[in-house]
Amino acid sequence: MVVLKFWGYVVRVGGWMSEYLVLFEVHERNREWFEENYAVLVEKFDKKFVAIYSEMVIDSDHDLDKLIERVEAKLPLEKVSVEYVTKEKIQLIL
């Protein structure tokens, strides 16, 4: 059984669900770290994709495919978060 905390709620799960929830928690922690450190990251990695593992940047590249290829050679990709860093404001058109 795995015990996780999401948005203030404690979740206890077992079986196949626990693996997915652990991965969700890993990505959530990486995302929070990314947002908290964005100002520092943008100075070093502007206009690059960054691969984040255990709340730290492990690689970066302008080319997403090249980054994924290198990361996949070292780590299980499902445990790595990939984000784009830019000083420019990004507009999403829905």
Image (spheres, grey):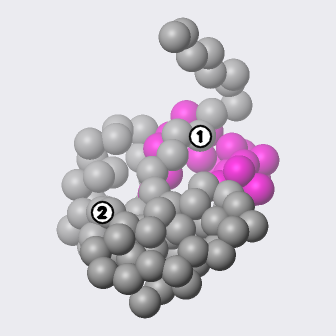
Neighbor class of circle 1 (other Cα within 10 Å; few <14, some 14-19, many 20+) is many
Q: Quadrant of the N terminus?
A: bottom left
The number of numbered discs placed on residues in the rendered structure image is 2
* Along the line of sight, the residue nearer the viewer: 40 or 11: 11
Neighbor class of circle 2 (other Cα within 10 Å; few <14, some 14-19, many 20+) is some
Q: From the viewer's perspective, is the residue at label 2 or at label 1 nearer? A: 2
Point 60% across, 55% down: residue = 31
Point 71% across, 51% down: residue = 35
Q: Residue flagged by tag 1: what amino acid is it?
A: Val
- Picture disc at residue 69: none
Q: Which residues are magenta?
A: 34-53
Horizontal and vertical percent position of residue 40? 75, 53
Q: Is residue 75 visible?
A: no
Helix, strand or loop at disc 1?
strand
Please tell me in which quadrant of the rendered image residue 4 appears.
bottom right
- Queried whether the magenta region covers residue 40, the answer comes back as yes
Q: Earlier in the sequence, mark 2 or mark 1?
A: 2
Q: Is residue 9 visible?
A: yes
* Along the line of sight, the residue nearer the viewer: 90 or 9: 9
- Looking at the image, do the residues carrying marks 2 and 1 touch, with CB atoms under 8 Å apart? no
- Queried whether the magenta region covers residue 22, the answer comes back as no
Horizontal side of residue 32 vs 75, given as left or right: right
Q: Please give the residue where the numbered disc 2 appears in the rendered image.
A: 77
Q: Please give the residue where the numbered disc 1 appears in the rendered image.
A: 85
* Along the line of sight, the residue nearer the viewer: 45 or 68: 68
Q: Residue flagged by tag 2: what amino acid is it?
A: Leu
Horizontal side of residue 30 vs 39, given as left or right: left
